[in-house]
Amino acid sequence: MILSDLILRSARSSRARLEGWMNGADSPPLLRGRWHRRTSVNKVLLVLTVLLTAPLPASAQQDAAEFYKGKTLRIIVGVGVGSGYDLNARVLARYLPAHIPGNPSVIVQNQPGAGSLAMTNALYNTGPFDGTVIGASFNGMPTTPLLQPAGARFDPVKLIWLGSTNRETQAH
């Protein structure tokens, strides 16, 4: 038997197995073995990843507690004292420390101007960027760069939006 004859026979048998597999037969044994080994390795890697990362939330919370302990968190409200946003921020400031590791103190500061735009621009451009400041702007602030591009000096996609204390919608 010459080499070309051997290659031809091998190709014919492979084609027959492939056609049988395509017509509903079980996958070829060679493919089945590789697939089984690959999924076994993937399962082992998944289990190892879960086991190695399971302690991370506890250590991350401990790091957060160390970071916030003794610090003062500021909620900067973009409108004047006595407004609904101001009152919501003051209620939030009363209960928020119990839900942050390290129980930092929380104060409310007002920086009115241009419907929260002045506060949002200042916070975006000057910071601080260490997690000690929360900006409380009007809920329509993410659309401001689209509607008033001359006044907005921030990219709403780069801000981290935490949520809202209000149940209201914004329509322009």
Image (spheres, grey):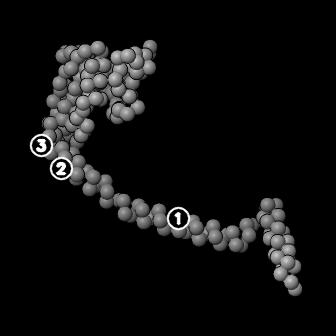
Q: Position of residue 7 (x, y in %)?
A: 82, 76
Question: How many marks can you see?
Answer: 3
Residue at the image point whose x is 37% and y is 63% from the top = 52
Q: Tell me, for residue 156, which label it has, or none.
A: none
Residue 42 appears in the rendering: yes
Mark 2 burial class by Cα count in 10 Å: few <14, some 14-19, many 20+ = some
Q: Residues within 10 Å of mark 1 (few under 14, many from 20)?
A: few
Label 3: which residue? 70
**First in residue order: circle 1 vs circle 3:** 1
In the image, what residue occupies the spot 85% across and 74% down?
Answer: 8
Amino acid type at mark 2: Glu
Percent position of residue 84, x then y = 26, 17
Q: Secondary structure at mark 3?
A: loop
Question: In which quadrant is the N terminus drawn?
Answer: bottom right
Q: Describe residue 100's horizontal placement relative to residue 145 as left or right.
A: left
Residue at numbered disc 1 = 42
